[in-house]
Image: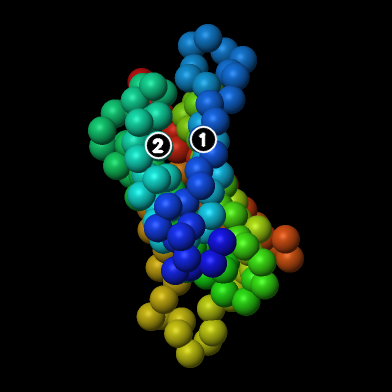
């Protein structure tokens, strides 16, 4: 879906609570929608609703929402440039034995920072790394995947 059209104002959203395998954990959350700015609020709202089901406290929820929001914003801003197709954004959240596994994936194009903008842009990955315990960014010709893990301490 291209920016500015009807879909930009009203994104089609697929939200799925996948059946969990452990009764002590909430069902995983999966959100799939167009990589457009209007989708970012949808991601935040669904994730904000899901986090308490995983026994995440408010401060940790804020960190997770900001980290996931940054990764999703990067997909909306960068992955669509020159993609030549409608770009989809997928966000998943799953409770693990030790914390949260979070994934933000798109099917757009990876764009390395031009050397002329280094120092002015590219702070998102540092922000994500400051908010969660691990961040792995995997760019491929088929899109980019950002995998994050946030430890939860009892």
Q: Residue furthest bottom?
A: 116
Against 36, residue 102 (above or below) is: above
Looking at the image, which residue is at 45% across and 85% down?
117
Q: Nearer the viewer, residue 3 or 106?
A: 3
Q: Badge 2 local density, few (<14 within 10 Å), some, or many (20+)?
A: some
- Residue 57 at what x, y percent from top left? 29, 28
Q: Position of residue 87 (x, y in %)?
A: 60, 60
Image coordinates of residue 65 in percent, x first then y, are: 36, 44
Q: Residue 46 has which mark?
A: 2
**Residue underneath mark 1:** 15
From this view, report whether residue 103 is shown above or below residue 126: above
Where does the image place residue 98, in percent across and percent down from the top left?
Answer: 50, 26
Task: Tell me the tag on residue 129.
Answer: none
Q: Residue at x 60, y 19 (%)?
A: 19
**Where, by quadrant of the figure, is residue 153 drawn?**
top left
Instruction: Find out whether the residues at labels 2 and 1 contact each other: C-beta distance under 8 Å.
Output: yes
- Residue at image position (40%, 37%) is 47
Quadrant occupied by the N terminus: bottom right
Answer yes or no: is residue 114 visible. Answer: yes
Secondary structure beneath label 1: strand
């Amino acid at each position: 879906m291209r920016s500015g059209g009807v879909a930009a104002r009203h994104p089609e959203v697929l939200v799925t609570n996948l059946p969990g395998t452990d009764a002590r954990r909430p069902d995983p959350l999966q959100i799939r929608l167009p990589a457009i700015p209007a989708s970012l609020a949808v991601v935040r709202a669904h994730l904000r609703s899901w986090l308490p089901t995983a026994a995440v406290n408010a401060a940790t929820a804020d960190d997770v929402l900001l980290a996931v929001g940054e990764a999703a914003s990067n997909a909306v801003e960068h992955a669509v440039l020159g993609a030549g197709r409608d770009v989809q954004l997928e966000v998943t959240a799953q409770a693990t034995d030790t914390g949260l596994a979070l994934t933000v994936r798109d099917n757009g194009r990876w764009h390395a920072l031009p050397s002329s903008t280094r120092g002015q842009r590219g702070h998102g990955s540092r922000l994500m790394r400051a908010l969660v315990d691990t961040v792995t960014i995997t760019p491929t010709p088929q899109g980019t995947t950002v995998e994050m893990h946030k430890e939860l301490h009892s």
